[in-house]
Image: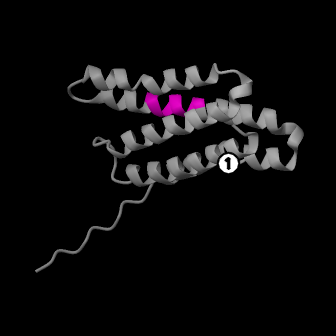
Amino acid sequence: MTTPATPPVPVPSPVLLYGRLGLIPFLAPAPAAWLWPDLAPAAGAVLAVYAALILSFLGGARWGMAVAAPRIDGRIVSLAMLPSLAGLALLMLPEAWRGGQLAGLAAAHALQGLWDLRATTVPAWYAGLRGQLTLAALAGLALGVAAVGL
């Protein structure tokens, strides 16, 4: 006798809403740069700053998970600081390196996303949402690289 499959747990509405709204600053800069070329430098800067902020936010979320664990693992707490430091270091690159900066931020987001997909102390819906949001953010960063050049 087979047991019925458990239905997937839906993503809570506020989390889904804010997750999707949070993609706008990833996805809007490249089209803005293409439509209004004079705005390309500002669009690239907005994308870079936002990508670094979100990277720091994701590291903070991971840090929060680590310190809430029954047994705190200092290695995980330390690793959770790296996204903020990587975002800051990449933001310090000169404007002339904007394409490389965006590519570096994309790589950092990809690594953070892979790490988050392996999280074990999260709700059942978390991995699916993080995967979708990470892919959309990476698409926005790739479009940003294409819009501002390397």
Q: How many marks?
A: 1
Magenta stretch: give its range. 52-60
The front one of 80 and 139 is 139
Please determine whether, in this image, residue 99 is positioned above or below residue 67. Answer: below
Please determine whether, in this image, residue 30 is positioned above or below residue 5. Answer: above
Residue at the image point whose x is 29% and y is 41% from the top:
121
Q: Please identify the quadrant where the N terminus is shown.
A: bottom left
Horizontal and vertical percent position of residue 21? 63, 48
Assess disc 1: are there few (<14), some (14-19) or many (≥20) residues with their C-alpha within 10 Å of its C-alpha: some
Residue at the image point whose x is 65% and y is 44% from the top:
26
Please determine whether, in this image, residue 6 is positioned above or below residue 24. Answer: below
- The residue pinned by badge 1 equals 143
Q: Residue placed farthest to the left in the image?
A: 1
Name which residue type carries label 1.
Leu
Asked if residue 16 shows in the view, the reply is: yes
In the picture provided, is 19 more to the left or to the right than 131? right
In the picture provided, is 132 more to the left or to the right than 124? right
In the picture provided, is 29 more to the left or to the right than 18? right
Is 124 in the magenta?
no
Asked if residue 50 shows in the view, the reply is: no
Q: Please identify the quadrant where the C terminus is shown.
A: top right
Horizontal and vertical percent position of residue 65? 34, 32
Q: Decide whether the magenta segment is chiefly helix, strand or loop.
A: helix
The front one of 150 and 59 is 150
Q: Residue placed farthest to the bottom in the image?
A: 1
Horizontal and vertical percent position of residue 82? 44, 24
Give the colour scheme of this rendering: one colour
Residue at the image point whose x is 45% and y is 51% from the top:
131
